[in-house]
Image (tube, rainbow, N blue to C red):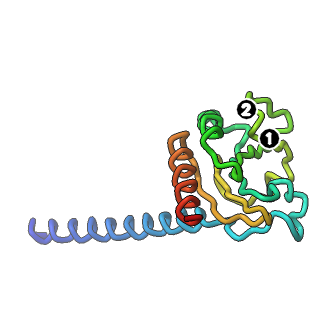
Amino acid sequence: MEPLTAVVIILAVLVALLFAAGAGLFRRVRELELATYSGVGLSMATGPDAQASGLAVPGGTTMVIKVNRRCPICDEVMLAAAALTATLPADMSFTVLSDDPGFDKALPDSIRVIRDPAIWRAARVPYTPALLVVEENGVVVFTAPVGSGEALTEIVERAVATRKEVKL
């Protein structure tokens, strides 16, 4: 076999592998994008998830932080939530939703803590820590993974700014 033919065959194989890798990566990105919207529109106050109605607060919007007992990032996210509570409008509040019945992290009194594994499972998002925005009627209107305290701060500040613009 001539060297030029060998080089062309090797390059063709490498290009085919590159296309296959790109297609696989694109598929994973689409799955992640779809997972981000998982749970939006879920009613936490009616139907089989009626036990989860405690997430909604009458007359306000609840930002639920779903944490896991084996989550190393969750402590940083909860510290950011504690720092943000003072800056929230009166009709917005934080709730921490944990799957650990023995959850005992020190949080401000203004942050509700729900330690019920059944409610934790009812809030169906495939990642933790997660932020779920629950309207007063119990419907989840937004979900997002929060991989750091900075990410939570950014999402909450954007939500507060959007609410102010809508009210104007």
The residue that appears at 67% across and 56% down in the rendered structure is 132
Using the rendered view, name the quadrant where residue 16 is placed: bottom left
Q: What residue type is labelled 1?
A: Val
Q: In which quarter of the image is the C terminus?
A: bottom right
Using the rendered view, name the quadrant where residue 36 is placed: bottom right
Looking at the rendered structure, the secondary structure element under dot 2 is loop
Horizontal and vertical percent position of residue 60: 74, 57
Using the rendered view, name the quadrant where residue 73 is placed: top right
> For this view, does 162 lie left or right of residue 114?
left
State which tag comes first along the sequence, 1 or 2: 2
The residue that appears at 70% across and 37% down in the rendered structure is 70
Residue 19: give its label: none
Asked if the residue under mark 2 is in contact with the one under mark 1, i.e. CB atoms within 8 Å, the reply is no
Looking at the rendered structure, the secondary structure element under dot 1 is strand
Horizontal and vertical percent position of residue 19: 34, 70
> For this view, does 7 lie left or right of residue 39?
left
| Label 1 crowd bin: few (<14), some (14–19), many (20+), radius 10 Å | some
User: Residue under circle 2?
Assistant: 108
Above or below, comparing residue 90 to residue 107 in the picture: below
Residue 104 visible: yes
> For this view, does 89 lie left or right of residue 33?
right
Q: Distance between the residues labelled 1 and 2?
A: 10 Å
